[in-house]
Image (cartoon, rainbow, N blue to C red):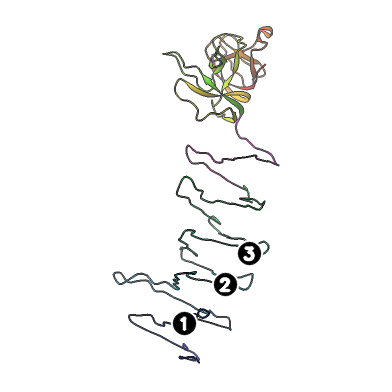
Amino acid sequence: MAQVHGTGQNEPGVLGQSETEDGVLGFGTIPAKAGVAGANDNGGNGVFGRGRVGVAGQGQDGNGVFGVSESEDGVLGIGKIPAKSGVAGANDNGGNGVFGRGHNGVFGDGRGPGGNGVVGVSETGDGLLGIGKIAAKSGVAGVNDNGGNGLFGRGQNGVFAEGMPGGRAGVFVGDVEVTGDLILTGGDVAEQFDVRPAPAGTREVLPGTVVVLDEDGSLAPCAQQYDSCVAGVVSGAGDRVPALVLDRRGRQGSGQSGRRDVAVMGKVWCRSDASSRAIRVGDLLTTSSRPGHAMAAVDRDAAFGAVIGKALTPLGSGTGLVLALVGLA
């Protein structure tokens, strides 16, 4: 038998009001029952809570519903139909629909065929945003121990990654399979080489420099015509950057020594000398006596084994940059 029972037609069935304590306080004494239970069989809310904004100096803002448990969930919601949630949060004024703070801020466990642990949908922002605060952890991490994808993305770009300054957009440990085209926006295939320190008072090896191998296998600017030790052209001059860099070992060196990306195939801007003969589109290019510069190869016999590539743009006189299609021969 209920100790308190109230029925109202156009007013609350039971109303409790207190200036200093809880408006209604209920204690349950058996495990299977609640301290306060609300039920509605006609489409309304079983329990509805509304909190008011706290007054400065007179306490905290009020929560619509606040739950605390020493051993179980603070708030537990169970949904019985597929179209509804066990617990739903909505905020139309710029706040969070659901906020979680704990060992796991939010934990989702999907059940049934096709059920998702967590689903995020947004009309204007990210569907799901994760922010990591320590270097050893991810902003968003996906793990699957049963043969599925750890992370799956579908969209205009299935997965978009942007590295922070000094970092990488992506790191893959293991094999990578690509079933479509691999689109590289750079202009050449380069390989890193050690560069011989430049003598004092001379210029460092700059992008676009034609380089040759020395006795130790290091690189230095070319300094003679038709040098068969030519290795390529240092990448990065003009608007061209490497599409692929082989044998990369850490960061590229700086100053007058270190390692340089040297184009061995593809299109690259090349420092060239047209002082003795104009360079025309289609000319074969070889080393010149001007340090680090190419010239048109007019002696085909001497050019054998010393060709850098083929000119794609002309240079009428003097020195300048020529776009070359690198292909050592």
Rounded to the nearest whole Å, what is the CA distance between mark 1 and mark 2? 23 Å
Residue that badge 1 annotates: 29
Asked which secondary structure carries label 3, the reply is: loop
> Which residue corresponds to the image point at 61% horizontal and 28% vertical from the top-left?
188
Q: Specify the farthest residue to the right.
A: 179
For badge 2, the amino acid type reads: Ile
Q: Which of marks 1 and 2 is in front?
A: 1
Work out whether mark 3 precedes mark 2 in sequence or the reverse, and give the earlier one.
2
Residue that badge 2 annotates: 78
User: Circle 3: is it few (<14), some (14-19), or many (20+) Cα within 10 Å?
Assistant: few
For badge 3, the amino acid type reads: Arg
Q: Can residue 272 be seen in this view?
A: no
Q: Is residue 139 visible?
A: yes
In the image: residue 149, left or right of residue 97: right
Q: Where is residue 144 in the image (x, y as percent from the top left)?
A: 62, 52
In this picture, which residue range is highlighted in magenta? 159-187
Rounded to the nearest whole Å, what is the CA distance between mark 3 and mark 1? 33 Å
Rounded to the nearest whole Å, what is the CA distance between mark 3 and mark 2? 13 Å
- Main SS class of the magenta portion in the image: loop
Q: Does residue 58 sit above or below 172 in this rendering? A: below
Q: Does residue 16 sit above or below 144 in this rendering? A: below
> Which residue corresponds to the image point at 61% horizontal and 19% vertical from the top-left?
314
Work out whether mark 1 precedes mark 2 in sequence or the reverse, and give the earlier one.
1
For badge 1, the amino acid type reads: Thr
Residue that badge 3 annotates: 111
Magenta span contains residue 183 = yes
In the image: residue 183, left or right of residue 106: right
Number of marks drawn: 3
Q: Where is residue 271 in the image (x, y as percent from the top left)?
A: 55, 18
Asked which secondary structure carries label 2, the reply is: loop
